[in-house]
Amino acid sequence: MMEYWENIPKPVFRIIFLKPNMMFGKKRNMTERIPNHVLKSAHWTLYWAMVFCRNYTAGKNADIRLVYEMMDALHAIPEILNRWGGHNNVDTLRMYFGCFNHAKWRKPEDTPQPPDLVAVFNQKMDEFNKTEAEQESPGDAQKRA
C-alpha cells in the first residue's frame, strides 16, 4: 500500500514537507511573532462576524449576498495571521475588515444589524492592549525599554 506522501509530486513534496517555512516560492519569516493583542483582536472580530452571520441567516428575510460579501472580506484573515510579518500587519488586517461595507446593509427592519468590523477590531485591540499592559510586571517594562 502506498503512503500518502508517495502520491505527491516531488516538487510539491519538497516545498511542503522539506521546507515548511517556504510556501509558493516565498520565504516566510519564522522569527517574527504576531503580538498577542493583535491575534486576540482578530480572532474576536472573526468570531463576532460568524455569530452575526449565524443569527442573520436564521431570519426569513436574510439576503445571502450580505453573507457572501462578509465572507469575501474575511477569507484571507487566517492566512494573514499565519504569515505575519512584512506586508501582513495590522494595517492589512484593518484593510480586509474594512472590505465589508456594513453601512450598505443597514436596514430598519427587525433584523440583526451588520457590525462595523474595523470598529470591532480597533475596540478589541485597545481593550486587549490595555489588559496586557496592566498585567505586565514592572520588570518586563524595563526589559522592553
Image (tube, grey):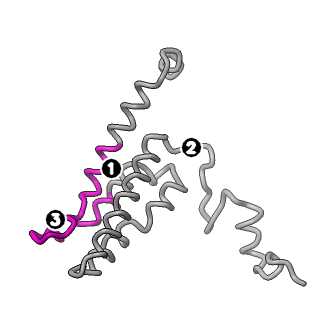
For the residues marked 1 and 2, what is the alpha-carbon distance in whole angstroms? 21 Å
* Residue 28 rendering spot, x and y as whole percentages: 60, 55
Q: Residues within 10 Å of mark 3 (few under 14, many from 20)?
A: few
Mark earlier in primary sequence (1, 2): 2
For the residues marked 1 and 3, what is the alpha-carbon distance in whole angstroms? 16 Å
What segment carries the magenta color?
Answer: 95-124
Residue type at mark 2: give it: Glu
Query: With respect to residue 84, does 50 lie above or below?
Result: below
Circle number at residue 121: 1
Mark earlier in primary sequence (2, 3): 2
Query: Which residue is drawn at the image coordinates 14% and 69% (left, top)?
Result: 110
Residue type at mark 3: give it: Ala
Q: Is residue 96 magenta?
A: yes
Circle number at residue 103: 3
Q: Secondary structure at mark 1?
A: helix
Mark earlier in primary sequence (1, 3): 3
On the rendered image, what quadrant is the N terminus found in? bottom right
Q: Which residue is mark 2?
A: 32
For the residues marked 2 and 3, what is the alpha-carbon distance in whole angstroms? 35 Å
Q: Are marks 1 and 2 in contact (CB under 8 Å)?
A: no
* Residue 131 rendering spot, x and y as whole percentages: 40, 31
Circle number at residue 71: none
Residue type at mark 1: give it: Phe
